[in-house]
Amino acid sequence: HVENGMDVRPHISVVTNFTRPTASKPALLTYNEVTTFLHEFGHALHGMLSRVTYGAMAGTSVYRDFVELPSQIMENWARQKEWLQDIATHYQTDEPIPGDMVDKIIAAGNFQSGYATVRQLSFGMNDMAWHTINEPVNKEVAQFEKEAMEPTELFPDVEGSCMSTAFGHIFDGGYAAGYYGYKWAEVLDADAFELFRQNGIFNRETANSFRKNILERGGTKDPMELYVAFRGQEPSIEPLLERSGLKE
């Protein structure tokens, strides 16, 4: 925000618990640690680059189903050979990561992505079912849950199972009626990154547009307005299906 004519930026820390160096090797990050850093750095950028008047509308102070776009989009660079082969080099030989290894990383990440997708959808449906009831439920919790999740079930029911009683995200974690946001954020970040793929993953004009229309604006406008201002259209599920290996 602007204070006494000065552009005042927040102090933001990215605190991690990454692999430590050993007596014979420096601190070498795993692939998951790299993607974790990219993710959290995206949240940091959302705060650091904010250009709004009130702190309550700055950075990550947006609707919950929009807050993960700036973070998750950053993870996409870790799937690009052009980026990985520039930053992922052997600490002894300086050789870049082999292209076939990147292919294997992507393939491993897409393993059972179909099941992972319907699993997240089932959680979202269960959450929404609990948070849209308008009269007392006169059936067992397990039965209510089973009916809510039935459209996504792939396997026979396991007698005695009931995840609702341990669904802390929606009853004690702030995600009430918003668990769908996990999958929706994937739709947003995959579709948004598609513009970078089209224009070049290091394209400055695209990056500046993302900064101006998404990162700087915080919660000052409806998320869809901000998204369309950047993307030029509403999000499509196609890029996510392709990235997940569910569609060629």
Image: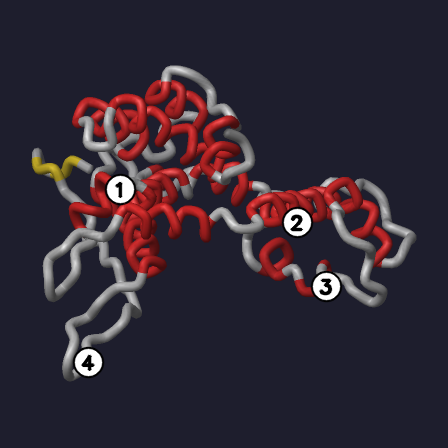
Query: Is residue 36 rendered to the left or right of residue 116?
Result: left
Q: Residues within 10 Å of mark 4 (few under 14, many from 20)?
A: few
Query: Is residue 237 rendered to the left or right of residue 150?
Result: left
Residue drawn at x 77%, y 53% is: 155
Query: Which residue corresponds to mark 4?
Result: 22
Total labels drawn: 4
The image quarter containing residue 15 is bottom left
Q: Amino acid at mark 1?
A: Lys
Q: In front: mark 4 or mark 1?
A: 1
Residue drawn at x 14%, y 42% is: 8
- Residue 165's disc number: 3
Q: Secondary structure at mark 1?
A: helix
Q: Amino acid at mark 2?
A: Phe
In this view, the residue in front, 118 or 67, is 118
Q: In front: mark 2 or mark 3?
A: 2
Q: How far is the residue under mark 1 from the one under mark 3?
A: 43 Å
Q: Earlier in the sequence, mark 1 or mark 3?
A: 1
- Report x, y in % for residue 79: 33, 44
> From the image, which quarter does the N terminus lie in?
top left
In this view, the residue in front, 90 or 73, is 90
Q: How far is the residue under mark 2 from the one under mark 3?
A: 13 Å
Residue drawn at x 30%, y 63% is: 30
Query: Which residue corresponds to mark 1?
Result: 81
Q: Earlier in the sequence, mark 2 or mark 1?
A: 1
Q: Amino acid at mark 3?
A: Thr
- Residue 5's disc number: none
Q: In front: mark 2 or mark 1?
A: 1
- Report x, y in % for residue 111: 52, 50
- Residue 123's disc number: 2
Q: Earlier in the sequence, mark 4 or mark 3?
A: 4
Q: Amino acid at mark 4?
A: Thr
